[in-house]
């Protein structure tokens, strides 16, 4: 059985959207219509010919316009209380307004003839108003019918009744009426199709977001569960290596341990990536020695760099405060990712780590880091790709150098999470430089010292 409740809800949503679009589209037409009424009254000679018709026309059209303007401006308040009353009143304003124009045209044709200036002016205005409403009222064909039929049907009937030149004018009005009704029907159908497509697109987007969130939670959970047995395998292998073993057994266990460690690193990357996708990464706030952290993290890579015959240098500016407050573990993770990539993709030469003070305020400092290598480099057209998940500059690198392509994506996400920014510069064959700048809070003692340094020159001015 069809979902009646769902279909009713869809129709209600479509009806609400149609009226909202009509209200938005009609506002400009109302101001233009008010100006057209003034133009018709000033350009014509109705005051000397149609003494009674003119006040009735002016009062009806202006009242209908102002009431429609009130309905649009107060739509949110009125529509929320009674949508049906809003629609009926809106239709009534259209009928009154169009009937006033149509009946005044009929009266002018009967009293003055078709060739009179007032009749020609009214014919021009009626046709302009008819075509002007085709866009603003097409979301609801009923509104268009309420506007066009009272505007053109009475003049057509009078033209046919008068005969003579009226037949030609009736034919013109009839062609215009037929075109407006057919075109309005077609535009309304296109509007409904576009609304349905937009609804389906929004629904598909929500489903995709929900699926992506579920995938992120699944990866986070499964990665966390896999890390526990992997740590057990590594621990047991380390214990086995401490026993009496033959050379062949030791080689096999060391290979097994190294493979398990590589798999653990992969699981850690997937876990971090899934946490970021699920927006569940929380930053810690603790005071630490930034210079020491950078130095120790660089020192971890001395052995891998030495095994490849690479130099590894670390330069830390003396201007950096001795203690800062932030997430030291995430900063270490960023540096490990960048240093690991730099050593991996550098066959000869060296790797250098720099940390410098970019700016200093009374409560925080901005530190700029750079990891520079003399490796293979990255082409200009690939530099924007490597920060995307599971991406490397060249697909063959996955086979030659290994890795998942998550390191840089995770590093950039962490930098952005810490309110920093990351960028790079590279030249194929000459190396790459990855920069990132991150703010850190100053501990209370450092804040007091920074404030004293900032205001010291003002509070203790130098003697003249």
Image (spheres, rainbow, N blue to C red):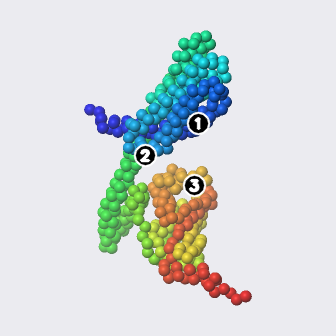
Question: Which residue is found at the position 50% from the left and 24% from the top?
Answer: 150
Q: Earlier in the sequence, mark 2 or mark 3?
A: 2
Quadrant (top left, top right, bottom left, bottom right) of the C terminus: bottom right
Observer-side mark, 1 or 2, equals: 1
> Seen from this angle, which residue lies furthest bottom?
463
Question: Which residue is found at the position 61% from the left and 59% from the top?
Answer: 426
Q: Earlier in the sequence, mark 1 or mark 2?
A: 1
Question: Which residue is found at the position 44% from the left and 35% from the top?
Answer: 89
Question: Which residue is found at the position 37% from the left and 65% from the top?
Answer: 257
Tell me whether the residue at label 1 lies in contact with that at label 2, contact meaning CB atoms closer than 8 angstroms: no
- Name the residue carrying label 1: 34
Place of residue 405 in the rendered image (x, y in percent of width and height, measured from the top left): 48, 56
- Name the residue carrying label 2: 77
> Quick check: 44 left or right of 106?
right
- Name the residue carrying label 3: 383
Q: Secondary structure at mark 2?
A: helix
Q: Secondary structure at mark 3?
A: loop
Query: Can the viewer see residue 286?
Result: yes
Viewer-proximal residue among 157 and 369: 157
Observer-side mark, 2 or 3, equals: 2
Viewer-proximal residue among 347 and 59: 59
Tell me whether the residue at label 2 lies in contact with that at label 3, contact meaning CB atoms closer than 8 angstroms: no
Q: Earlier in the sequence, mark 1 or mark 3?
A: 1
Viewer-proximal residue among 199 and 148: 148
Q: Secondary structure at mark 1?
A: helix
> Quick check: 6 left or right of 27?
left
CA–CA distance in space, label 1 to label 2 = 24 Å
Place of residue 346 in the rendered image (x, y in percent of width and height, measured from the top left): 56, 62
Q: Residues within 10 Å of mark 2 (few under 14, many from 20)?
A: few
């Amino acid at each position: 059985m069809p979902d009646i409740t769902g279909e009713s809800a869809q129709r209600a949503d479509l009806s609400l959207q149609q009226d909202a679009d009509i209200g938005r589209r009609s506002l400009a037409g109302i101001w233009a219509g008010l100006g057209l009424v003034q133009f018709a009254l000033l350009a014509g000679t109705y005051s000397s010919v149609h003494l009674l018709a003119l006040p009735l026309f002016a009062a009806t059209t202006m009242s209908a316009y102002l009431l429609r303007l009130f309905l649009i401006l107060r739509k949110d308040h009125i529509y929320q209380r009674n949508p049906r009353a809003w629609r009926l009143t809106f239709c009534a304003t259209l009928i009154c307004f169009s009937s006033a124009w149509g009946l005044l045209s009929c009266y002018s044709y009967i009293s003055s003839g078709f060739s009179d200036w007032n009749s020609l002016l009214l014919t021009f205005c009626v046709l302009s108003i008819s075509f002007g409403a085709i866009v603003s009222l097409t979301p609801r064909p009923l509104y268009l019918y309420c506007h066009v039929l009272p505007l053109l049907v009475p003049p057509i009937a009078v033209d046919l009744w008068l005969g003579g030149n009226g037949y030609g004018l009736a034919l013109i009005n009839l062609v215009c009426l037929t075109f407006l009704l057919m075109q309005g029907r077609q535009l309304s159908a296109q509007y409904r199709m576009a609304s349905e497509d937009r609804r389906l697109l929004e629904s598909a987007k929500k489903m995709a977001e929900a699926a992506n969130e579920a995938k992120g939670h699944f990866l986070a959970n499964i990665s966390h569960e896999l890390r526990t047995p992997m740590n057990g395998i590594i621990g047991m292998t380390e214990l086995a290596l401490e026993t009496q073993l033959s050379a062949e057994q030791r080689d096999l266990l060391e290979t097994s341990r190294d493979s398990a460690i590589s798999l653990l690193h992969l699981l850690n990357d997937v876990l971090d990536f899934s946490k970021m996708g699920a927006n569940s990464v929380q930053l810690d706030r603790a005071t630490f020695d930034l210079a020491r952290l950078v130095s120790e993290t660089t020192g971890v890579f001395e052995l891998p760099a030495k095994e490849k015959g690479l130099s590894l240098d670390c330069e830390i500016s003396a201007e950096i405060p001795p203690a800062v407050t932030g997430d030291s573990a995430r900063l270490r993770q960023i540096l490990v990712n960048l240093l690991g990539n730099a050593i991996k993709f550098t066959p000869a030469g060296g790797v250098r780590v720099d940390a410098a003070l970019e700016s200093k305020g009374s409560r925080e400092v901005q530190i700029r880091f750079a990891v520079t290598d003399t490796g293979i480099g990255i082409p200009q057209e690939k530099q924007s790709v490597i920060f995307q998940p599971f991406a490397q500059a060249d697909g063959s690198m996955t086979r030659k150098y290994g890795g998942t392509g998550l390191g840089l994506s995770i590093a950039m996400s962490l930098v952005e999470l810490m309110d920093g920014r990351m960028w790079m510069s590279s030249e194929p064959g000459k190396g790459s430089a990855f920069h990132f700048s991150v703010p850190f809070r100053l501990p209370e003692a450092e804040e007091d010292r920074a404030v004293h340094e900032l205001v010291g020159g003002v509070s203790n001015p130098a003697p003249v």
